[in-house]
Image (cartoon, rainbow, N blue to C red):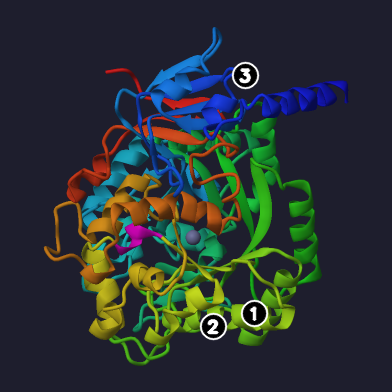
Amino acid sequence: MKTHALRLVLQTLALVLGASGPSEAQSSKAVPADTIVLHGRVYTENAKQPRAQAVAIRGAKIVAVGSDAEIEKMRAVGTKVIDAAGRLVLPGLVDSHIHFMDGSQSLGRVNLEGAKDASDIQRRLREYASNHSGDSWILGRGWNYAMFGPEALPHKKYLDEIFPNRPVFLEGYDGHTYWANSKALALAGITRETPDPPNGAIVRDPKTGEATGALKESAQELVAKIVPKPSRAEKLAALRAGIKWANEHGITRVHSAGGDFEELDLYDELRRHGDLTLRFYIAYFLNPPRLRPQDLEAIENGRKKYHDDWIDAGAVKFMVDGVVESHTAAMLEPYTDDPSIKGKLFWEPSNYKAAVTELDKRGLQLFTHAIGEYGVQSALDAYENAENLNHTRDRRPRIEHIETIAPADISRFGKLGVIASMQPLHSYPNSNALNVWARNVGPERASRAWSWKSISDAGGRLTFGSDWPVVTLNPWEGVQTAVTRQTADGTPEAGFVPGQRLTVAQTIDGYTLGAAFAGHREKWEGSLEPEKLADLIIVSQNVFETVPQKLAETRVLTTIVGGQVVYQADAK
Ligand SMILES: [Zn+2]
């Protein structure tokens, strides 16, 4: 109390003496900074002061942004000085859609990303298996539909050839389809007679009725439930590795869209040990068919316990449909390659609306996974309905993915204040996108593939992420894809739906201030200005001047979270 009164007197005195000039740097002169970053090209994301040279940090917060000369004045004996050496300084990046525990665990498993075909997959599996001969199961992920040719689905025969006796279970890159060998199917008790679970399908041979090893959506749980569970220590080790990887790529906060709410106490344990160097906003994953009392209890307990700058559990995630590649995304019109299917909603619309309305009324932020145009429309309808009933404003409900969209729904994001949470690297125009995804939806719908620019032009707010482990969490590959809509080799030449390309500034906004807004954190994060948390990065190249095709080569040199340096690249 006494100190407080004294500070008040001093502040009043300073005012009277006219010491509080327009620059924050001058008014803070008397109190030295803990850390100053000098000689940078600071891109602040603050419209009032877009560019600067230096940043001063005290405790966990930024206290001043200005010229080198202004910030130098805040240097004292104990001040840590970071020389940005003319490099670009940006607000810390946010990954707005991630499955952090899944991603962290995948770091230690076989990775099939980028394999050319089934025999390339076999080669990788053999190599992994010989290095992990002690593991009872072979687990991994990352295959995509195009790796299996026009069939666009994996088959157990490729696994049985090399692993007749060891169970293998491999997640597709999108997490929506899994691939098991005969041994794994047998251990799970899956036979010709096993019925499809709700919202899932055991893919079967049309002639024999036998399971092929491909398991769509919820059917994967039949095998997943018998896979040996990792220990608590193994999970903590995986999370530490995941956090390190995120910090190395300049990520300072993530928004979890599933699989992490159940692990909240592990994140808390990391914090108690001083190992939490990444901020977590974690959604409860709500399964259909309806919102149950035990869901509400878990959601309310979670947010009561965790609602601070580091761990916040104030969101709920729905998944209303699947993915385009396996025809599980809910479309308004039938799929082009197979007119007998439209895909269907995982939630009965009235149950979904009721759950959205109840959770919105309680002030929770809602995320809805919706990929098909019917899924997207259903989410917009439910959010509009909740707003009309609850008269709530600024709740910022979100739709995740939005791979296809009906033309009339584009402007509804801006009108309703619904956030478009998209993952630039999902539109990466490789053979999976062009030969499977685009074939399935047909050319007319493909002309609105990942329409982030149209949504933004119509007043909708964007936020970007990876959906790791669906794709790498390296945000710089996402930045390049949003700007070029091309592969790393520059194809297609004109870009995939080139009208949706964004500027670098728009893209960076989607990973910083836009993402902070999408998580209700823009008052404290997302830009470099006094009073905000000191989450910032120094990167290897000025992305605003880089050739677009080289944006993905950006490397992070320093990552600061809450005023602490949590990653420093080796000096070269
Ligand atoms: Zn996801």
In the rendering, at what x and y percent does residue 157 appear?
31, 63
Against 421, residue 541 (above or below) is above
| Element carrying mark 3 | loop
Q: Are marks 3 and 2 in contact (CB under 8 Å)?
A: no
Mark 2 falls on what kind of element?
A: helix
- Element type at marker 1? helix
The residue pinned by badge 2 equals 378
**First in sequence: mark 3 vs mark 2:** 3
Q: CA distance from mark 1 to mark 2?
A: 9 Å
Judging by the rendered image, the residue that carries numbered circle 3 is: 31
- Tell me if label 1 and label 2 are in contact, CB under 8 Å: yes
Which residue is pictured at 69% across the width and 34% down the height? 269
Closer mark to the observer between disc 3 and disc 2: 3
Q: Which residues are magenta?
A: 423-427
Please tell me whether residue 406 belongs to the stretch shown in magenta.
Answer: no
Q: Which residue is mark 1?
A: 352
Report the front residue among 462 and 23. Answer: 23
Mark 3 crowd level (few <14, some 14–19, many ≥20, 10 Å Cα):
few
Q: Amino acid type of disc 3?
A: Val
